Image: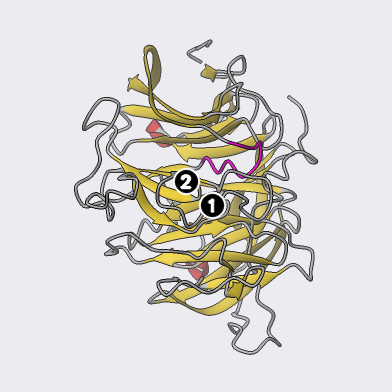
Amino acid sequence: MKVRTKGSAIIGTICMVASLTLATAYADEPGAPRQARAAEVTLEEVATARNPTAGTAGPGDTVWIAERAGTVRVLDDQGLGEPVLDISGETTTDGERGLLGVTFDKEFAHFYISFTDREGTSTVDEFAVRDGRIQPDTRRTVLTQTQPYANHNGGDIQFGPDGYLYIAFGDGGAGGDPHGNGQNLDTLLGKLLRIDPSGGEPYAIPSGNPFVDDPNAKDEIWAYGLRNPWRFSFDSGTGDLLIGDVGQNAWEEIDWAPANSKGGENYGWASMEGNHPYRGGTEPANHVPPVHEYDRNGLGCSVTGGYVYRGEAIPDLRGQYVFSDYCDGTVRALRMENGKVTGESDLGVNAGQVVSFVQGGDGELYVLDIGGGVSRINPA
């Protein structure tokens, strides 16, 4: 590992995201959300990165950008600086692997990275941060998970409003969940996890996790039945959880849970793909259906979940969930009330091969194009 204070295009291989998902319902479909009046926005490219995959708000109104090959760079008013972290010797970009997620705790006292090591094992590491700088000597591994295949690794990490670290893992890969991981509570694959990295060594299990008293389930599990939850987020205004879960070959979905959820949601995979039984599967009795889905009859192939916009620059967009699709690239927004979609709009901008969104500390949103573009969503 190299740390300092101050790659290759993956259009084909990053079907990492082309296993991802986005959602678009068509106005002529029964029960589809009405087409809402779109907020007027534009995209401003503020930097060019090397295959950016993820990002997070950092100290001092900065935005930290992860690059797939293993570097992290800081975006400020002067653009992207030189890497502040370089683990490129420890990861690989084979399949859907690489540096896949980054986040800070709420105090910016610790920085977390999610990556696949050279053997393909999903790994979450922690660094202490002092005066806005990573302290390399404090690095420690928080959690690892072996991966049977090179796709559907998931890898997103976020701190929730409760102060706990949430980690998303896909079902392990291949196609059709051959090992049945989505519905198996005895594996971390196909799950959203919740842990307390500061409460133990290497971490503690929050006492309120839904399966802590179940001897047949992993204590870390918060929700299950996920195929490849490539990007998830918490609404900074309400605390609600939204997950973009990539579909198999027919349906992309966005899942939702309220801020007061006690966890344990079953989002259905691999019995269900969206609202639809998968390969003759039977809908689980406790299935929590998506709040939004779209098929692959159009250009979309892989949902890229985003954020509920809570910035100040675009008042007409406030409170709407912004998302996209890796293959389509159109930036869209959902109006929601009490977990129900009441309207959908096309924001009229295309960000290319959208691999991720980033929410700055001021609530403004950035879009990452795996080809390199880092763009901010601005008012038109």
Q: Residues within 10 Å of mark 2 (few under 14, many from 20)?
A: many
**Quick one: 81 or 283, which is closer to the camera?**
283
- Asked whether disc 1 touches disc 2, contact meaning CB atoms under 8 Å apart, the reply is yes
Which residues, given as a range, are shown in magenta? 148-155
Instruction: Residue 103 in the image: state x and y as whole percent.
Output: 43, 36
Q: Which residue is mark 2?
A: 168
Q: Which residue is mark 1?
A: 229
Side of 157 where 245 appears, left or right: right
Quadrant of the drawing holding the C terminus = bottom right
Residue type at numbered disc 2: Ala
Any magenta on residue 150?
Answer: yes
Side of 304 where 196 appears, left or right: left
Residue type at numbered disc 1: Pro
Cα distance between the residues tagged 1 and 2:
6 Å
Label 1: which secondary element: loop
Which residue is at a point 73% across and 59% down the rendered structure image? 301
